[in-house]
Image: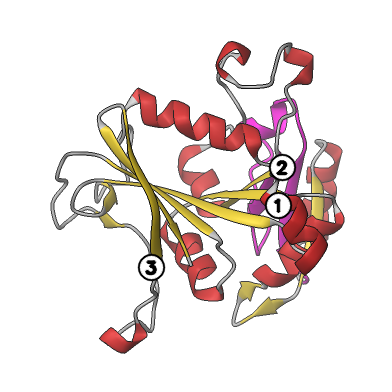
Amino acid sequence: INPGFFRRMREGRPHVRCKLAMSLDGRTAMASGESKWITSDAARNDVQRLRARSSAIVTGIETVLADDPSMNVRLPITRLPGVEHPEYLRQPLRVVLDTRLRMPPRARMLTLPGDTLVVCGESASRSVESELRELGADVLRLPQLGGRLELDQLLRQLAERQVNEVLIESGPTLAGSALAAGIIDELVVYMAPHLMGDAARGLVRMPGVDRMADRFELRFKDSRMVGADLRLLLTR
């Protein structure tokens, strides 16, 4: 069963998962930004399988500037069910949300196989857009709401590109915005058995959640051990 295909047919948008990795006390990085590695090799390999089943991987420009991620599938094909030869491995579309077009022209992902889509605001630099296009990236301009790109519009645009399943791998700001916008269908959380302290960075940023009545409620759907870590699957 392909939930993304049916959701795209019914709702005109892809099925959206958001992957988060955290310590036992809900931290994602040290105060300095150091985050390699919170989880085990087994958990990170499991994320590669999530990537392999996704049509697109979405992240924010802050993650690109901080980590220069590859955002590709790196597991050997022998560990990817249904993939028998390297030429059958389809790299997901890499999507970077970059309102002001700060995407570095030397970003690692621009040199890798597969397509990259940079999504910016309508007033972003035209010269930077031209430079990114010359490097092989596609650029999509979207309207903004409250200074942020409209995520519903993004999903509709991805659906038009035949994207069935989206995996969000980002920092706390984009993850919080996606949760607040109600676009996440599944939350996949990898929890490592260690403590990082109260100075470390939190899991998501969701301004305006000040009272118990404002809580964003989810339902546990599955839990299992992946190596030394606990993987939790939650739905709306």
Q: Viewer-nearest of labels 1 and 3?
A: 1
Could you say where residue 23 lies in the image, as x and y percent from the top left?
24, 46
Label 1 sits on a secondary structure element that is helix
Q: Circle 3 sits on which residue? A: 205
Left/right placement of residue 9 relative to residue 235 reads right
Q: CA distance from mark 1 to mark 2?
A: 9 Å
Q: Circle 2 sits on which residue? A: 55
Could you say where residue 170 lies in the image, as x and y percent from the top left?
49, 51
Could you say where residue 223 lies in the image, as x and y percent from the top left?
34, 45
Q: CA distance from mark 1 to mark 3?
A: 27 Å
Question: Which amino acid, mark 3?
Answer: Arg
Q: Viewer-nearest of labels 1 and 2?
A: 1
Question: Which range of residues does the magenta coloring cover?
Answer: 93-122
Label 2 close to label 3 by CB (< 8 Å): no
Taking the spot 50% from the left edge, 48% from the top edge, the residue there is: 63
Q: Circle 1 sits on which residue? A: 4
In this view, the residue in front, 138 or 180, is 180
Label 1 close to label 2 by CB (< 8 Å): yes
Specify which label sits upstream in the sequence, 1 or 2.
Answer: 1
In this view, the residue in front, 142 or 222, is 222
Taking the spot 51% from the left edge, 56% from the top edge, the residue there is: 186
Question: Which amino acid, mark 1?
Answer: Gly
